[in-house]
Image (tube, rainbow, N blue to C red):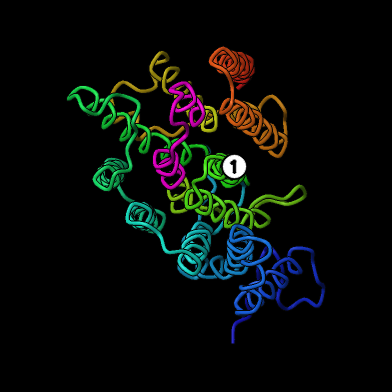
Amino acid sequence: MRKLHFAIFDFDSKKLSPLRIFWLCSILTFLILLLPIMRYRIFEYLGTWLYILLFAVSLSASLTPFMRTIALKLNIVDLPEERKVHESITPLLGGVAIIIAFIAALAANLNLDRSSIALLVCAVCVAAVSLVDDWKGLPARLKLLIQIAAALVLIHYGIMMHLFPENTFWGYGLNFILSVCWIVGITNSLNFFDGMDGLAVGISAIMAFFIGIVAFQTNQPFMGWIAVAMVGSCLGFLPYNFHFKRTASIFLGDTGSIFLGFTLAALAVKGNWSLHNPIVSFAAPVLIFWILIFDMTYITVERILTGKVKSFKDWIEYVGKDHLHHRLYTLLGDKRKAVLFIYFLCATLGISAIALRNARPIDGILLIGQAFLITVAVSILEYSGRQRH
């Protein structure tokens, strides 16, 4: 029988590395959580959210090494290229472990409503297409069309923005267009942002965390539990994807980044951010997702102005090393510092979104102004990074 070797740990070695200990503890935790008495105790005394979190973390962490083995056997790997920052062949399919853990954590513990089920089904369908792309490759236009179709299904099930009056044709039309643009835009922004170890999965966990806080503050438990499942599945995968002393042993792949982006974007649309304050309804999710919005906007404007893209086809197919994380890497000289910088920036804007929820209109305007000033500061850094790059 052929021996299986993992970059994260070696099953033939007697040495217990910290990551192998984490994996073994995750399996043990997951098995304990399956006991009916343990499930009852946590639900009764500690809360549903904690059980879902532990379930997602432990299952995601337990499955990731097996996904790595499958990826290697099927040759679903990411090869080093000039446009990429990693230097060795790295297996994909990390996103599959996240998806399984996320879906299982919700399916085993909740009776979801129709719109939530539609959200999960559409997210899985979009991820399945991306899985084929990771394995065999698909045209960018086909993937985009499928994402638009999935967004239309969500709208059919009531997951749509409500920023403008819906009793008018123009109001409904604007809500419809903005919902599609938001879901598809955020989905691809996160996919584009998956360019360094731990980056996409880390900011996904941070954004889901703040969505969960808003959900529980506004008495939207189902939205909160979905966010908690997202946080847990990301955290279970993160130790394999981000480490201070070694490179990632497995990547999310487009399967994972597309799934995370689509789910988070749809969850933001599904949630009620404020019933009486339009500033909060608009600005709170924008602040939480601001890193992705800013990066997508910045590179789009720059690529057009510099002539790198001259058509819509060029835009969806262009791949370059001009994103925020690439330029921070150029400035800081260290990938991990660049990733941590973005973590803290994302968390800072998320805190602003939480503070915004109970703010007076003038306070809300000031918080939005603060986010704008942070953006200006980051833009200066980006410009310096572009000059050096």
Q: Which three-letter amino acid code belongs to the residue tagged 1? A: Ile
User: Over which residues does the magenta segment extend?
Assistant: 261-286
- In-image side of 133 versus 81 (left or right): left
Closer-to-camera residue (186/339): 186
What secondary structure predominates along the stretch shown in magenta? Answer: helix
Q: Residue at x 73, y 66 (%)?
A: 22
Q: Looking at this rendering, what residue extends furthest in the bottom direction?
A: 1
Q: Looking at this rendering, what residue extends furthest in the right direction?
A: 15
The image quarter containing residue 40 is: bottom right
Q: Residue at x 42, y 64 (%)?
A: 111
- In-image side of 20 versus 175 (left or right): right
Say above or below: 40 vs 165.
below
Return the residue at label 1: 213
Q: Position of residue 279 (x, y in %)?
A: 47, 21
Closer-to-camera residue (3/232): 232
Closer-to-camera residue (304/119): 119
Q: Position of residue 304 (x, y in %)?
A: 38, 17
Q: Residue at x 33, y 52 (%)?
A: 115
| Residue 383 is at least partly visible in this image | no
Q: Position of residue 124 (x, y in %)?
A: 38, 57
The image quarter containing residue 262 is: top left
| Residue 68 is at least partly visible in this image | yes
Q: Position of residue 89 (x, y in %)?
A: 57, 55
Residue 263 lies within the magenta run: yes
> Element at badge 1?
helix
User: The N terminus lies in which quarter of the figure?
Assistant: bottom right
> Pointer 1: residues within 10 angstroms few (<14), some, or many (20+)?
some
